[in-house]
Image (tube, grey):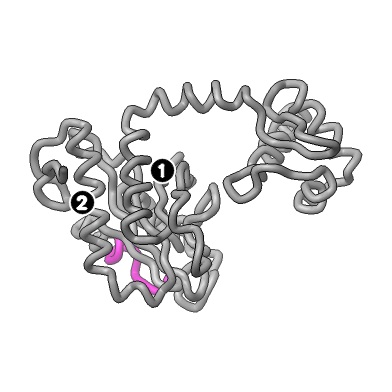
Amino acid sequence: MPRTLATVEQAVRVLEYFDADHTEWALSDLARALALPTSTLHEQLSTLTASGLLRRTGRGRYQLGWRLLKLSSALYGSLPWYSLAHAEMERLARGTGLLAFVSVLQGEQVICIARSVQGRGGATVEGETRFELPPHATASGKLLYAYAGLPRPAEPLYTPRTCISVWSEEAAHIRAAALAATEDEWALGTSSLAVPLRAAGGEVLAALGVSLPTPRLREREALTRRLHDAAAEVAWALGARGRNGEGLVSPMH
């Protein structure tokens, strides 16, 4: 691997360790998490701090830098549907008490671009809480792969329930119901549901869903209705005025 590419990839790896659960890192703790010598990491952090991508908050402690706000503002500004999706995601989390998320497909990668503040307490759920998600073991991954017509990866097998279905049949069912679901497929005790967020012309933009303790799947019908209502709100706001996979799109308020 060229040295320049390796340097960039290492910088990206460092930045990805900062998230909603780890907004600040001490040098020693981050070095352990990354399995890097503190001297090597200190040099990388100093470079990232000098560029404005990180900022020091105390002796040996770091947070994301203000320069990232400019980059994120430019990204979100290029996605006119993002603020609508984010608002519905948070409303969904408040109404259900569950962790809600929005995910997109980038090539063959399933990326969780937003997750709710609400719904993070109580029972711990594994699904949908990372930046890059396994497409074969998460509801958002299954949904986005089904609509994109991609083959489902066969590995890794996280639990005995990972990849137990015939993918061609499951993908067809996902598209017909405009709904994907998992049950104990990424982690035992955790399940998830996801529906498509559509543009006015019907194009699938992203997946909107919830991650939940498996016992709450008994509420699947009600949760599915909430998800489809939230997705319809986004589609309506984007100009859809007809039928999509979930039924008639109409304002909820």
Disc 2 and disc 1: Cα gap in Å?
A: 19 Å
Residue 64 x/y as whole percent: 66, 33
Is residue 162 shown to the viewer in this render? Answer: no
Residue 108 placement, left or right of 57: left
Instruction: Give the SS element for disc 2.
Output: helix
User: Which residue carries the number 1 mark?
Assistant: 104
Tell me the SS state at disc 1.
Answer: strand
Q: Which residue is mark 2?
A: 229
Residue 251 falls left or right of residue 49: left
User: Quick one: 246 or 28, which is closer to the camera?
Assistant: 28
- Asked if labels 1 and 2 touch by Cβ distance under 8 angstroms, the answer is no
Answer with the quarter of the image where residue 71 lies. top right
Q: Residue at x 61, y 50 (%)?
A: 21
| Magenta highlight on residue 188 | no
Q: Is any atom of residue 170 visible in this view?
A: yes
Which quadrant of the structure image shows residue 225?
bottom left
The magenta stretch spans which residues? Answer: 162-171
Q: On the image, which quarter does residue 173 sit in?
A: bottom left
* Residue 108 placement, left or right of 23: left
Q: Nearer the viewer, mark 2 or mark 1?
A: 2
Figure quadrant of the C terminus: top left
Query: Dot 2 surroundings within 10 Å: few (below 14), some, or many (20 or more)?
Result: many
- Residue in the picture at 71% in, 40% down: 14
